[in-house]
Image (cartoon, rainbow, N blue to C red):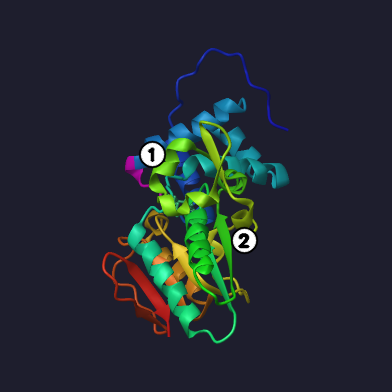
Amino acid sequence: MYKMYSNKPFLHISPLTEVEYQRWSGLLAERLGIIVPKERKMFLQSKIWSRMREIGYTAYDKYWDYINSGIEGNLEWSQLVDRLTVHETSFFRHMPSFDLVKEDLLRKIHLSKESLRYKMWSVSCATGEEPYSLAMMAAKVCQSTAMKTYFGITATDVSSPAVALAKNAIYSADKKKNIDQEYHEYLVTLNEEMFTIDEKLKKRMAFGVFNLLDVNRPSNIKYDVIYCQNVLMYFEKKVREQILDGLVSYLNRDGLLVLGQTEINAWSHPKMTRVNKNRTLAFRLK
Ligand SMILES: C[S@@+](CC[C@H](N)C(=O)[O-])C[C@H]1O[C@@H](n2cnc3c(N)ncnc32)[C@H](O)[C@@H]1O
């Protein structure tokens, strides 16, 4: 059980000792692959401390024991992960990458003889804006063709609170400004301040918690598009490459891996060719 909120006066942040910093940053590196350099020690400290205070802990070692205490500890870990990860995102965040996926879908519709099943995976979906953008774009394309086309989207993130928000799909009205008018038919106004996404699109989505560090575990699931943006930069280069190598095994033949433009330098893979499109970083399975 969570400890009760305390009525104690505000306590100033207790500094992480060198040993504690090594311990906590080591846990993050081990479980999330995220490196917290010394310069960001204050960030780590403030996030852990704020969560500790919220649930009534005042000693890092007691909180450490709690985090490492079986099922309850796992639940608490997911809360802490949510604090330590950055969920900044927006609808249609990087338009050239969405255009690339649109072109790929149109091309595959053109090439397919009968019906087409098109599967996409948003690997760090944060609060859902990215996968819903993919869904809106795909729905529009599918509406415009006589070809029977089915699309589905898997959206995952390591943060379970972020995934819950993504599934809930309730967004503030100001986020509409990033969504082109042609897609507004897929938005449902809830009130002056909030909107949600049309049920027809929600039905195409499957949300789940997934840690990219587990991507090298064997799996038979395959996708036509893997959309991986603004997440690799949190990992060391070696870990980034391991993640990308793992993602390749999730691609269907001719499948597309779409990365953030500055996400990795000089990555190559014997099974992948670089896609030549301005202002994008993408690879196709040969
Ligand atoms: C800056 S957001 C990017 C969201 C979206 N992809 C975009 O480009 O707008 C980074 C996301 O990566 C997630 N993340 C961090 N470490 C992760 C890991 N090991 N596995 C999966 N997701 C992770 C965070 O929880 C966060 O939601």
Residue 152 x, y percent position in the rendering: 59, 66
| Front-most of residues 2 and 223 | 223
Label 2, secondary structure: give it. loop
Per the rendering, the mark at residue 204 is: 2
The residue drawn where x is 49% and y is 36% is 172
- Provide residue 44's location: percent of width, then percent of height: 44, 39
Magenta highlight: main SS: loop
Front label number (2 vs 1): 2
- Amino acid marked by disc 1: Lys
Q: Position of residue 178 (x, y in %)?
A: 39, 47
The residue at which mark 1 appears reads as 41
Along the line of sight, the residue nearer the viewer: 128 or 109: 109
Q: Amino acid at mark 2?
A: Arg
Q: At 43% across and 74% down in the image, what residue appears?
A: 104
Residue located 65% across and 57% down the image: 203
**Stretch in magenta:** 35-39
| Res 162 → quadrant | top right
